[in-house]
Amino acid sequence: MANREPIDLYAPHSPEQIARTLKRIMDDPMPGAKARVFGKGSEREMTLRYRQRAARTNMEPVLDAVMESYKGGTRITGTFGTPPEARYFPYVWVGFLSLFVIGGVLAYLYIPGAGLFATFFAGIPLLMIFGGLAAFRAQPRPADDKAKILAFLAEEIDARPIT
């Protein structure tokens, strides 16, 4: 998900009460949970993400939002999407490792007797490129994370979309 989706929610609680509720939930380590919503924030802002306990990559989509008093409750406005560092990291990964692949190919072509060295010098980074790309593709769909975060907010602070 390269673009960030706007989020506009209303919760019938004050920003302070929402901050206390979310802090209480985030402070609970929930050792038995295989996955959970977690994040940080204050009375004015929040950052939430859904993370599998066994797979911590910091590449999960994030809800970044601000909270403000609104009609006796709180309006939560923000965006949901992949953080910039997560969007650009695969390009940096492939670009950096490609330098070694190119170096290995050039060594193979232009240095007599460097065949085995060049094979390893190019082959290992090539495997790392394919392994990294497979790991990036194995990430859960952002829409699933968004649904889980919105369900969490609906359950814990009764937040609903503003229509």
Image (spheres, rainbow, N blue to C red):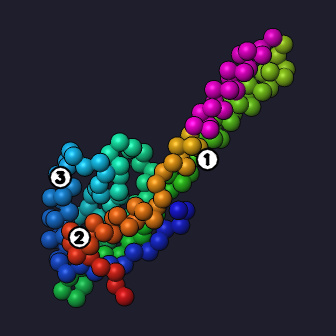
Type of the residue with mark 3: Asp
**As drawn, is 104 to the left or to the right of 142?**
right
Q: Secondary structure at mark 2?
A: helix
- Position of the C terminus by quadrant: bottom left
**How far across and how far down the image is residue 136, in percent?**
53, 47
Q: Secondary structure at mark 3?
A: helix
Mark closer to the observer (2, 3): 2
| The disc label shown at residue 133, or none | none
User: Which residue is tagged 3?
Assistant: 27
User: Which residue is tagged 2?
Assistant: 155
Q: How many marks?
A: 3
Residue extent of the magenta highlight: 113-131
Residue drawn at x 29%, y 48% as measured from the top left: 34
Residue drawn at x 63%, y 26% as measured from the top left: 124
**How far across and how far down the image is residue 60, in percent?**
43, 54
Type of the residue with mark 2: Glu
Residue drawn at x 20%, y 45% as measured from the top left: 31
Q: Is residue 2 visible?
A: yes
Residue 48 sits above or below residue 122 on the image: below
Residue drawn at x 28%, y 66% as measured from the top left: 152
Alpha carbons under labels 3 and 1: distance apart: 35 Å
Q: Residues within 10 Å of mark 2 (few under 14, many from 20)?
A: few
| The disc label shown at residue 91, or none | 1
Residue 93 occupies which quadrant of the picture?
top right
Q: Secondary structure at mark 1?
A: helix
Q: Predominant secondary structure in magenta?
A: helix
Q: 4 or 56, which is in the foreground?
A: 56
